[in-house]
Amino acid sequence: RKEVEQDPGPFNVPEGATVAFNCTYSNSASQSFFWYRQDCRKEPKLLMSVYSSGNEDGRFTAQLNRASQYISLLIRDSKLSDSATYLCVAYSGGGADGLTFGKGTHLIIQP
Amino acid sequence: NAGVTQTPKFRILKIGQSMTLQCAQDMNHNYMYWYRQDPGMGLKLIYYSVGAGITDKGEVPNGYNVSRSTTEDFPLRLELAAPSQTSVYFCASSVKGDTGGYTFGSGTRLTVV
């Protein structure tokens, strides 16, 4: 059974701080990974893909650890607007039904 | 650029009623999906389509039906609504099926009473 596990939080973080959260996946055959952001009562939106070598997009850094089967998301200099739920997603192949979504980590940035 | 459009945004159904959730995309994406999201739970795939005329079951297809007569439209039909179908339904589309770059619609909040 494909599983993607996340700490649901909430993570309460002061504005300007750095926050990181992980996601573990059970299917060692998972090929690619993504972070989505979902605001309250809104649809998920792709935040970034996660590459094997790690990748950075502005204040956001994503890392992949295949040996331990987890991915991470680091947010630096957090903003109030970063408050959202962050969904971890793994693709395990097999075609269009190969995506597995985690339940999400709720992040609250406090002023 | 509309992206993925879902209607209605909200709906209350009585047990046993039927309805169709509409989904349309204007990005010429071949792949389209229907997910449901229950509170505190991950997105669960109901049905998907890799092109006009082709549909396949996802993880939780029972109680639902779909059709894909055109590239643009992918309606989801609920027959004999049950309280267990109370959820938020998201339609999504993508260029390919093996990437995570999905575009989601804004969702339909359905309550079955």
Image: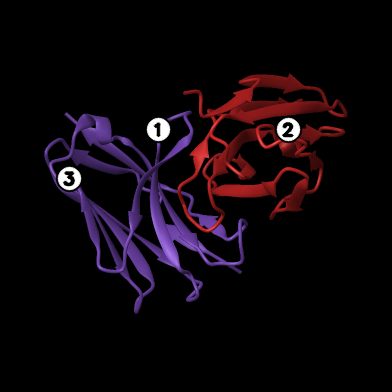
The residue that appears at 79% across and 39% down in the rendered structure is: B67
In the picture of the structure, the residue carrying the numbered disc 1 is A39
Q: Which residue is mark 3?
A: A59
Dot 2 surroundings within 10 Å: few (below 14), some, or many (20 or more)? many
Comparing B3 with B34, the one in front is B3
- Give the chain coloured purple: A
Say few, some or many: other residues with alpha carbon within 10 Å of mark 3 (under 14 / 14 to 19 / 20 or more): few
Q: Is A9 displayed left or right of A55 in the figure?
A: right
Inspect the image, locate mark 2, and give the three-letter code of the amino acid beneath it: Pro
On what subunit does the disc labeled 3 rest? A
Residue B47: x %, y % from top left: 71, 47
Check the residue under mark 1 and report the chain it is in.
A
Report, in whole angstroms, how far the alpha carbon at label 1 lies from the one at label 3: 18 Å
Identify the subunit bearing mark 2: B
Give x and y (percent) for residue A104. 43, 48
Residue in the picture at 19% in, 34% down: A79
Tag 3: residue type? Answer: Arg
Where's residue B93, x and y in %?
57, 41
**Which quadrant of the figure has residue B90?**
top right
Q: Amino acid at mark 1?
A: Asp
Q: Secondary structure at mark 2?
A: loop
Disc assigned to residue B50: none
Label 1 crowd (10 A; few <14 / some 14-19 / many >=20): some
Please give left or right for residue B112 compared with residue A14 in the image: right
Q: Nearer the viewer, mark 2 or mark 3?
A: 2
For discs 1 and 2, the disc positioned in front in the rendered view: 2
Q: Earlier in the sequence, mark 1 or mark 3?
A: 1
Visual hue assigned to chain B: red
